Amino acid sequence: MTATLPAGRPALRHPLTLAALLTWATVAMTLHLGQPDHLALRWGCALLFLAAYLATLLYPAHERLRHWLLLVEAGSALGLAMLPGSGIAPALLVLLAAQAAATWPLRQALLLMGLTNVALYLLLRPMHTQPLLVVLSFAGFQGFAMLTVHYARVAEQARDRLTLAHADLLATRALHADTLRDAERLRLSRELHDVAGHKLTALRLHLRALANEPGASDQLKLCGQLSAELLGDLRAVVQALRDTGQLDITTALRAVAAPLPRPRLQLEVDEGVSINNPELAHVLLRCVQEALTNSARHSQASQLRVQLSQQPQALLLCIDDDGQLAGQLRPGNGLTGMDERVRELGGHLQISRAPAGNLQLQASFPS
């Protein structure tokens, strides 16, 4: 169930969590209706289920631990159901079904709940007159909960893909606009150099020839001087147009992070950084985009730090977040693709885990 909780709201205070806790409290209130013989054992199973459920909320990034906790929930719910006076204990399996659908693919979740309901039927058969009816009744609620969570999960994934595509479009548009402006500046500089520059040079040569003739006026000499100054100014403008072809990588990086609710991008770009290569800008954009996606999906980070600095021999991109990686560090398709992009430009990507447990990325590109 926690997999579908919207980001930014504490999991323990989310309405879905409060509804689940209310369900557990309702089951707990029915434990006193039976005989007091196994009351302590009934409460032990109920509290074990609650502890496992809360642990899945507090440690959402630990996938392996979460899987084991779901099995603990199944065992404690079945143990409670087999005890006399357990009331509506099978209702806890509805919570388990919702969590299973949020954690595993639908087929695996259905398999778990199918086996759990078979076990419930076998446990209820010796002590209940209509065990099949009871199991089918609760199985219907479980199926409803599983399908609701499953389709909510599908909708959430579609929304995430749409958000990433929108961010990608905004960033690509920013880089494309810079590339178009750079191409237009280059075209204008060439036209000024080839057309106006050529004619000014010819005009200056003619004025110089006339100024060297006997009896040339001072005004003619002044025209020659002005043409020389104008030609120098034109060359300076052409050079300035060529030198200002710098891509606005800062705007593009902020654009790719803007639509994402988390993590928040903390961007630091040194003043000496100048990106003139569109391919390099594209790779930097993809590296930061993949880091944002990984932090949001795997480390539950709230902030992503990106630093771009110009070193004597290389351009350095450093990325880290404030999240926590669960399990061993295994680069997936995203990080592998990032490494391939960096290597295509002659760079090097270093992937490591910080002492605090968060992921660190460092990419260097030759100057």
Image (tube, rainbow, N blue to C red):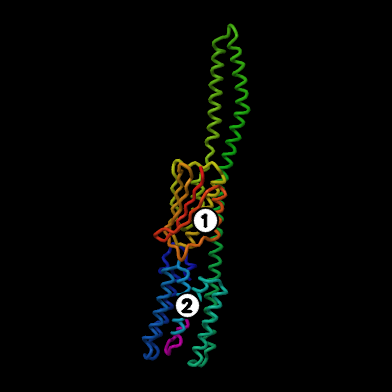
Q: Secondary structure at mark 2?
A: helix
Q: CA distance from mark 2 to mark 1?
A: 33 Å
- Residue visible at 47% across and 67% down in the picture: 5
The reply to whether the C-beta atoms of the residues labelled 2 and 1 are less than 8 Å apart is no
Question: Looking at the picture, which amino acid does disc 2 mark?
Answer: Leu
- In the picture, measured across the screen, residue 186 lies left or right of residue 86, that is right
Residue 200 lies in what quarter of the image?
top right
- Residue visible at 40% across and 76% down in the picture: 51
Q: Secondary structure at mark 1?
A: helix
37 inside magenta stretch: no
Magenta residues span 80-91
- Counting from the top left corner in percent of width and height, residue 16 is at 45, 71
- Within 10 Å of disc 1 (Cα), the crowding (few <14, some 14-19, many 20+) is some
Q: Count up the numbered dots.
A: 2
Question: Looking at the picture, which amino acid does disc 1 mark?
Answer: Glu
88 above or below 210?
Answer: below
- Counting from the top left corner in percent of width and height, residue 311 is at 45, 43
Residue linked to disc 1? 290
Residue linked to disc 2? 71
Residue 166 lies in what quarter of the image?
bottom right
116 above or below 178?
Answer: below
